[in-house]
Amino acid sequence: MTVDPALSALAKPIESGQPWPRPACPKCQAGYITFAPPVEDESHSSASARGHDAFEPEWITGTFVIRGQCENPECQQAVHGTGDYEVGVSRLSGEDHDYDYSYGPPYSSYLTVTHLHPPMLMMPIPKSAPDEVREGVMRASRVLFADPGLAATALRATVERFLTSAGISATQPTGQFRTAHERINEWRDADLTRPPIADLFFAVKWLGNAGTHEDSDLTTIEVLDGARVLDEAFHRLFLGPDIDAHAKTINAAKGPSRLP
Ligand SMILES: [Zn+2]
């Protein structure tokens, strides 16, 4: 399993009438979330402008809510979402458009998600990963759509949480905080197998630095690309231990370990 492609699809404006992406359920991680059609609310200023002589459908803006549910009958987790929409020329062919005027091209609403609750997990968390890593990924996931710069910063912090759990000190003997760069270097140099993984950590660190800047214009898609890099690093670090643990349960049960 890797970073859910449905999240990248949710990060782009979705034309009304188009089917919504189906992300993996954050609760059971076995089912997928199916969304019902969104409900749009035009903003007051947008509605007031409709009487203007120069009015064009492109002026229309508003907010929307959407409800989804996990299709796994054992889970049925509800997901609530919200965001903004604006109106633009439709990319769909055919007759099914929201705004048809007697002249000009057909228009549609384009919906941009800003929040989903409970948050979609940005990347799978290996079972053997320490709790600090799990918390870091959860924290990044909560702001993925609302504030991509902050999500990138939280991903960088996840690398730092991992380094702390691996025994790489966050402070110097003088009490001063060490940079992420310095700490990754120390972790890398302790083992010959680590340099390729350290390179992945550095990439996440650079994205985090870009996200931390006051004028950060990092997009959700770019943060998800960073999550893909971190996922690969964790995959290499924890997949072996995950498989070892699974083999242990099979050996203990002398067969497949099944829940009663
Ligand atoms: Zn579910």
Image: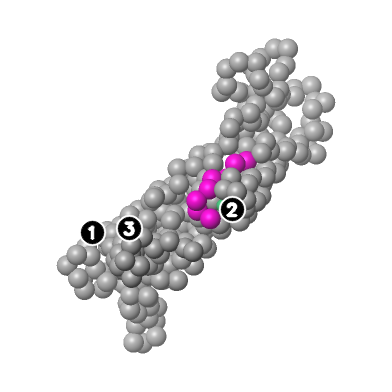
Against 221, residue 238 (above or below) is below
**Label 1, label 2: how far apart the Cα atoms are:** 41 Å
Residue assigned mark 3: 235
Give the mark nearest the N terminus, 1 or 2: 2
Which structural element holds mark 2? loop
Which structural element holds mark 1? helix
Mark 1 vs ligand 1: CB under 8 Å?
Answer: no
Instruction: Mark 1 vs mark 3: give the one in front.
Output: 3
Question: Can you see residue 157?
Answer: no
Against 125, residue 58 (above or below) is above
Instruction: Mark 1 vs mark 2: give the one in front.
Output: 2
Q: Residue furthest bottom?
A: 174
Q: Which residues are magenta?
A: 28-35
Mark 3 residue type: His
Q: Is residue 111 left or right of residue 221?
A: right
The circle drawn on residue 196 is 1
Mark 2 vs ligand 1: CB under 8 Å?
Answer: yes
Q: Callout 3 environment at 10 Å: few (<14), some (14 to 19), or many (20+)?
A: many
Mark 2 residue type: Glu
Query: Where does residue 238 sit, x and y in percent of width and height?
Result: 32, 64
Which structural element holds mark 3? helix
Residue at 28%, 63% in the rendered image: 240
Tell me the quarter of the picture where residue 88 sits.
top right
Q: Is residue 231 left or right of residue 29?
A: left
Residue assigned mark 2: 74
Against 9, residue 140 (above or below) is below
